Image (tube, rainbow, N blue to C red):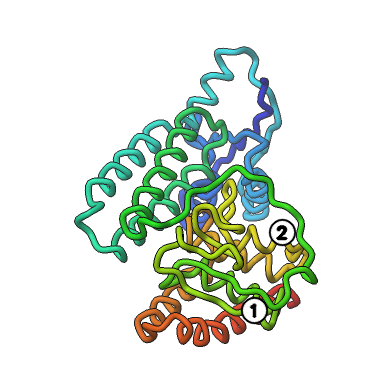
Amino acid sequence: MTTTWLVLTATLPANPSGLRVRVWRALKATGAGTLRDGVYVLPDHAGTAQALWELERTIVEAGAPAHLLVLQARDAAQEGSFRSLFDRSQAYAEFLQAIKDVQARVGIASEAELRKDRRSLETRLLAIQTSDFFPGKDGRKAVAALAALRREIDLHVAPDEPASTDARIPSRAIADYQGRVWATRRRPRVDRLATAWLVRRHIDQSATFTWLGDAKKCPDSVLGYDFDGATFTHVGDKVTFEVVAESFGLLGDAALRKFAKLVHFIDVGGIPVDEAPGLEMLVRGLQSRHEDDDQLLAAALPVFDACYEALKASHDS
């Protein structure tokens, strides 16, 4: 496929140096490649392409000559030469080595350290992907390696964490799920606690919860969630909160959609969400304070209420 390229040419004065610094920082943020000093190239499908147009205007307004050209490579060799400026193979190789370094720590490092390492790797991969304008097998290999590490950590710190299924998520009527008992694994983490909040606040105010020491012994009369074989559990890349919300048609609520992304990131990683570290820390604090799971849920409900209201307010403003 032929690429349309943006080529920025600029001649910047040595003094004052402020303009050169501003331009250099802006170019770095776009991920543009350098053909030579003063000549920079970026594929026009890059998410940062608009910033290059704005940079041309900034330079011109500062009194320096600049031109942004839109062109296609004259032949395959030149196309390859341009694309080579965006080769991220070394970045992916270093990322895979970092994955191996963390894998070597599984079983040695604490849960908190492993989860911190995982978050750091997720952020690092996202940064690489953002500037990988021609994704290929290296990127897919990195994504698969991170997913495998995530699963390895989860199995180490929580051996009963459910495996994802490829089942279809059926539509369910809220009216058919009133006065029910919901059951999940004891000592709930964010996904299980948030799902309980979702049920209480948006599906069934009278719902009750039971905490299973052995999920395999879940009674047939209750609604199991977030364990293998449960009525509601991970499906594809969705965590249980997302599955329940989608099943009951609740994701038309913009704040709940943001809440779902928040729970997803805390539980399995992915695209970072600004509020995630704070909410995760609060839930860990509640877990430390409450050994009884009913008390833990009672304490968590107002925390999730406040989070939801904050997300609503940020969406409405």
Q: Position of residue 45 (x, y in %)?
A: 67, 37
- Front of the two marks 1 and 2: 1
Q: Residue at x 61, y 74 (%)?
A: 181
Residue at the spot of label 1: 207
Is residue 62 toward the left or the right of residue 32 in the image? Answer: right
Residue 16 appears in the figure: no
Which callout, 1 or 2, points at the residue further toward the start of the chain? 1
Q: Position of residue 140 (x, y in %)?
A: 49, 34
Any mark on residue 256, and which? Answer: none
Q: Which quadrant of the rendered structure holds the C terminus?
A: bottom right
Residue 172 appears in the figure: yes
Tell me the SS state at disc 1: loop
Q: Which quadrant of the rendered structure holds the N terminus?
A: top right
Any mark on residue 247, and which? Answer: 2
Tell me the SS state at disc 2: helix
In which quarter of the view is residue 154 placed?
bottom left
Discs 1, 2 touching: Cβ within 8 Å: no
Q: Amino acid at mark 1?
A: Ala
17 above or below 210? above
Q: Residue at x 55, y 13 (%)?
A: 77
Q: Position of residue 266 (x, y in %)?
A: 48, 63
Q: Position of residue 144 (x, y in %)?
A: 45, 38
Which of 255 and 177 lies nearest the eye of the viewer? 177
Which of 203 and 140 lies nearest the eye of the viewer? 203
Q: Residue at x 52, y 42 (%)?
A: 131
177 above or below 138? below
Q: Amino acid at mark 2?
A: Ser
Which of 183 and 30 lies nearest the eye of the viewer? 183
53 above or below 110? above
41 above or below 105? above
Q: Residue at x 19, y 56 (%)?
A: 108
Is residue 108 toward the left or the right of residue 305 in the image? Answer: left
